[in-house]
Image: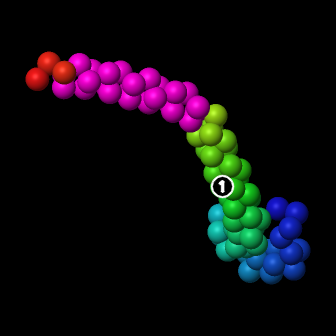
């Protein structure tokens, strides 16, 4: 609310705007750049967090898939020998 130009607040008061009208017509439009900037920074941090989590968990996932592929290939060899 500190970023709102006091002239806009005074104009709203001079038109006898209610509290709801002041919020919708004066405060929200003045705060849109700050809200969008916060969302942009938050989204960037969220994406970085997801990528770091994927990297951290990918070692476990690749080890699991390697063990499964080894087991699967061993069972295929046994199946191929029996035919």
Q: Is residue 55 magenta?
A: no
Question: Secondary structure of the magenta portion, mostly?
Answer: helix
Residue 1 visible to the viewer:
yes
Where 40 falls versus 50 (above or below)?
below
Q: Quadrant of residue 5?
A: bottom right
**Where, quadrant-wise, is the N terminus in this rendering?**
bottom right
- Magenta residues (range): 57-80
Quarter-of-image position of residue 25? bottom right
Q: Front-most of 58 and 13?
A: 58
The residue labelled by disc 1 is: 43
- Name the residue nearer the viewer: 38 or 41: 41
Q: In this picture, is 30 found above or below 50? A: below
Q: Position of residue 71 (x, y in %)?
A: 35, 21
Q: Residue at x 56, y 35 (%)?
A: 58
Please report the residue visible at 74 percent of the width from the left and 64 percent of the height from the top: 37
Q: Quadrant of residue 50?
A: top right
Q: Residue at x 44, y 23 (%)?
A: 67
Q: Position of residue 32 (x, y in %)?
A: 71, 69
Model colouring: rainbow
Q: Is residue 75 magenta?
A: yes
The answer to whether one can see residue 14 in this image is: no
Compared to residue 44, the image places residue 72 above or below, namely above
Q: Position of residue 61 (x, y in %)?
A: 50, 31
């Amino acid at each position: 609310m500190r970023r709102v130009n006091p002239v806009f607040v005074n104009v709203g008061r001079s038109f006898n705007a209610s509290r709801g009208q002041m919020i919708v017509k004066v405060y929200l439009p003045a705060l849109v750049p700050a809200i969008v900037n916060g969302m942009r920074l938050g989204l960037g941090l969220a994406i970085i967090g997801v990528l770091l989590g994927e990297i951290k968990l990918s070692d476990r996932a690749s080890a699991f898939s390697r063990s499964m592929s080894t087991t699967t290939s061993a069972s295929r060899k046994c199946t191929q020998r029996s035919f």
